[in-house]
Amino acid sequence: MQVISVSSLKGGVGKTTVTLGLASAAFALHLRTLVVDMDPQGDATTGLGVEHGTNQSIAEVLRDPRASTVETVITPSGWTQDSVDVVDVIPGSPLAVNFDEPHPKARDLWRLEEALAHVEADYDIVFIDCPPSLNALTQTAWTASDQVLIVSEPGLFSVAAAARALRAVADANAERRDGELRAAGIVINRFRPQSIEHQYRVSEIRDMFGDQVMDVQLPERSSIQQVQGAARPVHMWPGEATQDMAHLFDRLLRNLLTHS
C-alpha cells in the first residue's frame, strides 16, 4: 500500500483539486483507493460525494486509531455507486482542529499510521489531503506517508511556500525511525500559459528546484470547478478540456508510482 500526502504550506493553490484528480486517475486504473481528508474544511470529502458527519470522521480515527474505529469510519465515496471498484474516504471534519496543535507530542504523530496499518491489505494506494499548515495534522499525515507531493501555483508566495515545504519534508524524514519519507516533487497547478507572470514564475521554480519539479504542469480549467461541484471523478466528465486534465492526472500518478 502506497501512502501519498498532498500538501502545500499556502492555502488556495488547488491542493484538494490535485488530490481528487489523482484519486480519479487511480479509480480509472482500478486501484483500490482510500482518500484521507485531514483538512478540517473537508473539501475532499465533499468532492467525493460524501456527506459530512461528526461521529464518522478523521477526528474519531485520531482519537482512537483501533481497527474497529477505522472500519466504522471508512465510507464508500459517491463515485463508486455504480461500480465494483473501490474509492473510499475517511471523511474530514471541523473537529479535526482539536488535533492540530502547533507542537504535538511525538507519540501522537503515529496515530494515523497506526490506523492505516489495520487496512493495509484492503487498498493499493492512499491519498492524504493535508491542511495548508505544518501543524500536527500535516505532521501526522507525513508520518504515515511514503511520499509527499507538494502543490504550488505560479506566484511569488507559493514559490516561497514550496521551498519551506521541501525543507520541512527533509526535516521530517531525518526525524523518522525508518528514514523513508521522500518528497515526490513539486507539481505546478493553475498555470495560465498566456500569463507573462506565470511564465516567469514557472521558469523561476524550475531554476530554483530543478528536477524536483514535476514534468506535468496542470493548467487552470474552469471545467474542474464543475466536476468538483457535481462530486464526480474528472475521468468520467465529458469535454475535451476536462479529458485533457484527466490525462495529465494519469501522467502525474504514473510518475508517483514509478518513483515509489
Image: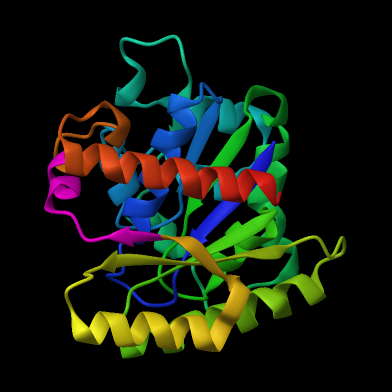
Question: Where residue 37 appears, x then y in whole percent?
Answer: 43, 48
Question: Where residue 45 appears, x then y in whole percent?
Answer: 33, 41
**Residue at 34 percent of width and 65 percent of height:** 189
Q: Is residue 244 visible?
A: yes
Q: Is residue 58 above or below residue 70?
A: below
- Locate residue 105 relative to residue 163 in the image: left or right: right
Q: Is residue 191 above or below residue 2?
A: below
Farthest-out residue, right: 177
| Range of magenta residues | 217-228
In front of the other: 81 or 254 = 254
- Locate residue 231 relative to residue 119 in the image: left or right: left
In front of the other: 9 or 160 = 160
Residue 224 is covered by the magenta coloring: yes
- Locate residue 197 relative to residue 33 in the image: left or right: left
Rendering quarter of residue 70: top right
In front of the other: 206 or 111 = 206
Residue 240 is covered by the magenta coloring: no
**Residue at 31 percent of width and 69 percent of height:** 13
Q: Image quadrant for the N terminus?
A: top right
Rendering quarter of residue 231: top left
Rendering quarter of residue 117: top right
Question: Where residue 25 appears, x then y in whole percent?
Answer: 44, 35
Colour mapping used in the image: rainbow
Question: Where residue 154 appears, x then y in whole percent?
Answer: 32, 78
Q: Is residue 15 above or below residue 196?
A: above
In front of the other: 68 or 204 = 204
